[in-house]
Image (cartoon, grey):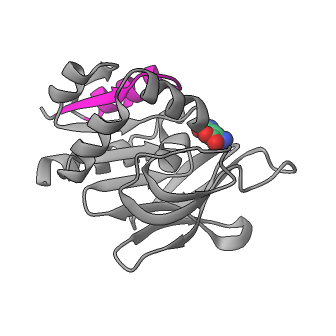
Amino acid sequence: APKIGVLALQGDVREHLRALEASGASASAVRRQEELDAVDALVVPGGESTAMWKLAAAFELLEPLRLRIKEGMPAFGSCAGMIMLADRIEGGIEGQQTLGGIDMVVRRNAFGRQVDSFEADLDFAGRGTTRAVFIRAPWVQSLGAGVQVLGRVAPGDRIVAVRQGPLLATSFHPELTGDARVHSYFVEMVREL
Ligand code: GLN
């Protein structure tokens, strides 16, 4: 089974570990460089991207993470994780950095106060309808030619799932629904790459 880590600085780590195991991966928490070195791929969970960035810096993980991504390690980011995998962000706090990797602009807290959190059905990667949970979610504001759109959501037809090579990101939280579609897709990606 592919060894997939979940960045465990902050956010909903346990739910991702469970979803990955259910999708046939061997999942482990990653808090230190040695733990990062031991995995084939990484999930960056939902949570709070500002806190995740500060903790990654404090744990001296920013550069090791950026290096692995540059070397082609497959990664999947959900919600705050999508923000972390974006090359550029809008609505970040002063000085907020990401890991980068996906050629896109992601807008934080994009759906606004009126609809802080909501659920919607959407088609993911042409694999049928999945229930998507959005919690103070970002959307993809713009993307480069190399980025593939894997999902959109009805309010505004916004882009909420993308892939660029070995990197996958969703605005929503597939780890919270028990629908393993997105995690299975990621585990397949890791097996193929
Ligand atoms: N709004 C959060 C952020 O900016 C993301 C929310 C989430 O991950 N559910 O990081």
Q: Give the magenta part as a residue range.
A: 3-23
The residue located at (12%, 32%) in the rendering is 1
Q: Determine the residue located farthest toward the right in the rendered image.
A: 114
Q: What residue sits 37% from the left and 54% below the top?
A: 168
Residue 47 at what x, y percent from top left?
58, 32
Residue 173 spot, x, y in % from top left: 54, 41
Q: Quadrant of the C terminus?
A: bottom left
Give the image location of residue 51, x and y in percent: 58, 29
Residue 35 visible? yes
In this rendering, the answer to whether 19 lies above or below 169 is: above
The residue under the point 37% across, 35% down is 62
Q: Residue furthest front?
A: 95
Q: Name the residue rendered at 29%, 19% in the picture.
A: 32
Total numbered labels? 0
- Reply above or below: 193 against 64: below
Task: From this view, report whether residue 27 is shown above or below residue 87.
Answer: above
Residue 76, located in which quarter of the rendered image? Answer: top left
Whether residue 15 appears in this view of the structure is no
